[in-house]
Image (cartoon, rainbow, N blue to C red):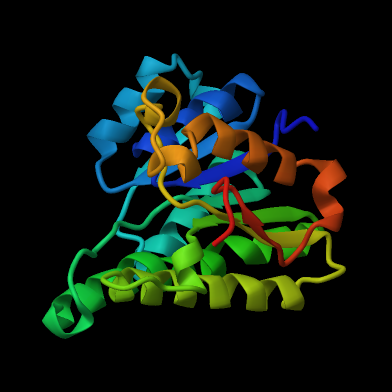
């Protein structure tokens, strides 16, 4: 299930999940294009993990801007000659308020982070995969996307839109050697609270290491049969 020498684009690389993904994929020998808003933070991450210049590209951009995302894809192709894996780890959270108490700009923020950024990445990074007859497109989503709880409507809208893009893509690339799949997570347990202080609330939380292990499998040759899946990693039924 090796990703050695695969060219892997990691968006949201400096986040709590992105850092673990970056480290593990680097250890497995992948060539990494790390995307985020701060070039300083991306470069610091590459230095922290002692990544060789031949193995790494750092690129700062706003993924909600289509031209910038296209330019990032061009930079990856110029550096590595191909794009084989896209890991979409971006997207914040707005919640805790009843729908009637939310603001329009909060909705727009969720649309930009989850839908527009995803759309731009798929448009920019997937065509080289289709051209080369091989690729893995993966995104981290939430059970809220299909079964939104109360006081979480805007986040659910963002995730539902992103999932619609991904699942549509999965049908369009079927049989091409490219796959598109979703990993569903309730809460990303960056502090390992589920292990250190287990409670009824955190029993459904998922560690970055658990998510990364699933992403690695889905990137493998052996996982090529999996396409259009919504894989639950939240420990209990939703």
For the point 31% across and 54% down, the residue is: 61
User: Picture quarter containing residue 222?
Assistant: top right
Estimate the x, y position of residue 168 in percent, counting from the top left.
65, 78
Q: Nearer the viewer, residue 26 or 106?
A: 106
Q: Is residue 211 above or below residue 95?
A: above
Q: On the rendered structure, is 69 left or right of 44?
A: right
Estimate the x, y position of residue 7 in percent, counting from the top left.
63, 40
Instruction: Indicate the quadrant containing the N terminus: top left, top right, bottom left or bottom right.
Output: top right
Residue 219 appears anywhere in the view: no
For the point 49% across and 73% down, the residue is: 147
For the point 51% across and 18% down, the residue is: 52
For the point 26% across and 71% down, the residue is: 151
Q: On the rendered structure, is 141 left or right of 64?
A: right
Q: Total label count?
A: 0
Q: Nearer the viewer, residue 63 or 221?
A: 221
Instruction: Indicate the quadrant containing the C terminus: top left, top right, bottom left or bottom right.
Output: bottom right
Residue 85 appears anywhere in the view: yes
Estimate the x, y position of residue 60 in percent, counting from the top left.
31, 47
Q: Is residue 111 above or below residue 133?
A: below
User: Which residue, as the protein is rendered here, is positioned at the far front?
Assistant: 200
User: Picture quarter containing residue 113?
Assistant: bottom left
User: Picture quarter containing residue 122?
Assistant: bottom right
Q: Is residue 83 above or below residue 128?
A: above
Estimate the x, y position of residue 224 in percent, counting from the top left.
83, 52
């Amino acid at each position: 299930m090796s990703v050695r020498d695969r060219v892997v684009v990691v968006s949201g690389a400096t986040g709590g999940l992105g850092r673990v993904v970056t480290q593990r994929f680097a250890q497995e020998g992948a060539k990494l294009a790390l995307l985020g808003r701060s070039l300083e933070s991306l470069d610091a991450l590459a230095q922290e993990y002692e990544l060789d210049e031949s193995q790494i590209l750092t690129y700062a951009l706003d993924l909600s801007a289509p031209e910038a995302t296209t330019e990032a894809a061009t930079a990856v192709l110029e550096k590595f000659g191909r794009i084989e894996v896209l890991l979409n780890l971006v997207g914040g959270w707005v919640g805790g308020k009843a729908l009637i108490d939310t603001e329009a700009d909060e909705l727009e923020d969720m649309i930009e982070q989850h839908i527009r950024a995803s759309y731009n990445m798929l448009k920019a990074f997937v065509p080289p995969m289709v051209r080369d007859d091989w690729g893995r497109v993966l995104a981290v989503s939430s059970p809220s996307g299909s079964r939104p709880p109360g006081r979480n409507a805007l986040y659910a809208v963002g995730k539902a839109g992103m999932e619609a893009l991904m699942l549509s893509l999965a049908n369009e690339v079927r049989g091409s050697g490219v796959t598109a799949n979703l990993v569903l997570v309730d809460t990303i347990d960056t502090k390992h609270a589920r292990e250190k202080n287990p409670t009824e609330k955190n029993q459904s939380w998922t560690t970055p290491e658990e998510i990364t292990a699933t992403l690695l499998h889905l990137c493998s040759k052996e996982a090529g049969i999996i396409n259009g899946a919504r894989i639950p990693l939240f420990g209990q039924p939703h």
